[in-house]
Amino acid sequence: MDYVIETESLSKIYISGEIEVNALKSVDLKIKKGEFIAIAGPSGSGKTTFLNLISGLDSINSGIARLAGKDISLMTKKELSDFRRDHIGFIFQAYNLIPVLTAAENIEYIMLLQNISPARRRERTLKVLQDVDLSGKENRFPSQLSGGQQQRVAIARAIVSNPDIILADEPTANLDSETGSSLLDLMHTLNRKRGITFVFATHDPKIMDKSDRLIIFKDGKVDSDIIKNDRAQNLKNESN
Amino acid sequence: MLILRMARRNILRQKRRTLLTALMISGGFLLFSLSLGISEGTYGSIIEMFTRMHTGDIQIHKSGYLQRSSLYKTINNADDLKIALKKMEFIKSFAPRVYSSALSFAGAKTSGAIIMGLDPDMEAVSTSLALQVKTGNFLPFEPSKKVILGKGLADILKVKLNDEISLIGQGADGSIANENFHIIGIMGENGSSFGQRHCFMHIKDAQDFLSLGPKIHELAIVLNNHKGARKRAKDIKLALNDKSIDIDPWQVIEKDFYNAMRADRKGANISNFIIMVIVLIGVLNTILMSILERTREFGVMKAIGASPSDIFKLIMTEVILLGLVSIVIGIIGAFAINYYLSIHGIPVTPIAYGGIKFTQMISSIEAKVIYQPTYVFLIAIVLTGLYPALRAANILPIKALGDR
Ligand SMILES: Nc1ncnc2c1ncn2[C@@H]1O[C@H](COP(=O)(O)OP(=O)(O)O)[C@@H](O)[C@H]1O
Ligand SMILES: [Mg+2]
């Protein structure tokens, strides 16, 4: 088994008024622990929808999504939020952070939800801020940080609870190219050194380049699924 | 602690809006507390005046006497009652009285008069009636055919201190009562003070004059603690278990006053309720607005694993924090203003009631004036917060994250 994410015929139809949109059409995907995957494809091809479905943020119309072996359609609201808290890290395009909390507090908050003691929260927060190269900025509020720094805090928050997978929806879209690159490097390092699984929904060629596996969505379907390097090939072989 | 910090900063996010809401809450609190304080203070002082001056807290009569008084409706076992009452530790003192109407003469003048026979000794420890004698002296402890006239009666009869008056009335045995009395005091002043038409005399003189023997019409009881007269009246009733007598608290004795006071309080409650509703609509509006503005934030919080109850708790913490701070401000203001008004009062057009002229509304700073609005506001604010908090808690993360 060992898949972090496994979908079978995953489908989603949005109905707005008279119009039905088949946002996702029978997607079968398996994602292994440690993968660094880019999901690309034209705007409206269903990338975000896919991430929302596999994280339980949105409801599934048909098919199955299993996260760490668990069928998420069988979970209650509370189980889903606990599951996200303990197993999934999120990085959005922008406005990821809670504006009234400092960088450190934003990271602490998720551990507070996990009932981790204040002392341990503090310790882990400082450690993870170091990992994302933000030491010394822990008491700044999001508004006092640059876009790139904010995304670093978001990454720190995503990794602090040791999730099985980090879902990043266009994480570099709001950043200039240089900042985006350094952010990508950071995530790549985290993947390589710590084995953290990353799934990106992205337009960014740099992310596609750096990914081990590139999945292209088109019209809500998987158009192509390319293993780009040995590392990914090895991961794939291991699971067979 | 992080949640508390978060709540505090969220509240301070829109400083002006928060300030306005807080002022609304504390203003509403203040009005509520003031209306309670003035009601308690003003009515309290009136109640205190008439209970201390002459009615006492509780009275005992022959059953039916209050509804329709009569010379013949007497308490015949007064001595037994006195012994029983003496044993009740919550009773401070009591005073026996007899009443009758009579005709009074002085020179060529005539007037109806109300005879009130009282025990100067027991009256002195029970009421402040003696202090109302503005000219001359109070009755001596021994019966001596001396009387004190109400100011109104004295004026009609054109009598003064040391003059004689004659009283003609009916004795309980059917005889005609006719006797002369020596005036040693004038009770009260011009106007509305108590006992204008009264003729006060020693209870023994009155019993002799009216051929009542040892019978009395009334026992006025003063309690150690003036509050709870109704409950004590019940206690006494239970202890004495005598169907032939009525035991009534001042609320029944001064029924008209009591009912007027209740109606007035009900009116005050209604206006307090309206103030409350206005404040709560303002609070609700503020919370709803702040939640709407933060929709996306709740989406992120939910995405990273905050459960509905985590969000609910956050909003409720904000609501309660805002409420508490506003209430504390309200308490400080209410305390200050109530305290000021308990000393200085607000002058009003003089109103006379039951022999008491009252010229100002005063406030009171008893505990009720603070704790009642406190818990009413706290509960109301918490209830008001529930709907927005539930709404925020149940925001669908996908909806909240939309348009990113
Ligand atoms: N909440 C929604 N209601 C209606 N249609 C939606 C909703 N979310 C997405 N869609 C539609 O579903 C399709 C896929 O959208 P999305 O997953 O956001 O694409 P991508 O992230 O690849 O740009 C689009 O046609 C989009 O308009
Ligand atoms: Mg998208």
Image (cartoon, grey):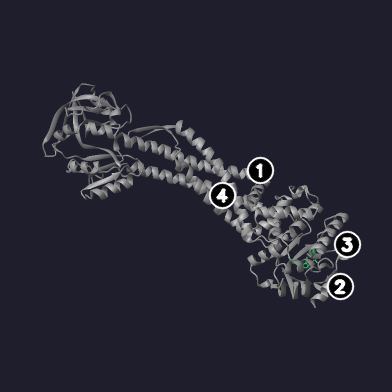
SS at badge 1:
helix
Question: Quarter for ligand 2?
Answer: bottom right
Residue behind mark 2: A226
Residue type at the position of mark 2: Ile
SS at badge 4:
helix
Which mark lies nearer to you, 3 or 1? 3
* Disc 3 residue lies near ligand 2 with CB under 8 A: no
Residue type at the position of mark 4: Leu
* Pointer 1 local density, CA inside 10 Å: few below 14, some 14–19, many at least 20: few
Residue B5: % across, % down: 65, 49
* Pointer 2 local density, CA inside 10 Å: few below 14, some 14–19, many at least 20: few
Q: Is residue B374 visible?
A: yes
Split into 4 quadrants, where in the image is the C terminus of chain B? bottom right
Give the CA separation, mark 4 to mark 2.
60 Å
Q: Is residue B74 visible?
A: no
**CB-based contact (under 8 Å), mark 3 and mark 2:** no
Residue B262: % across, % down: 39, 45
Kindly indicate whether the residues beneath marks 4 and 2 are on one polypeptide chain: no
* Pointer 4 local density, CA inside 10 Å: few below 14, some 14–19, many at least 20: many
* Pointer 3 local density, CA inside 10 Å: few below 14, some 14–19, many at least 20: some
**CB-based contact (under 8 Å), mark 2 and mark 1:** no
Give the CA separation, mark 3 to mark 1.
46 Å
Residue behind mark 3: A206
> From what the image shows, is residue B56 above or below residue A30?
above
Q: Quadrant of residue A201?
A: bottom right
Give the CA separation, mark 2 to mark 1.
56 Å
Give the CA separation, mark 4 to mark 3.
54 Å
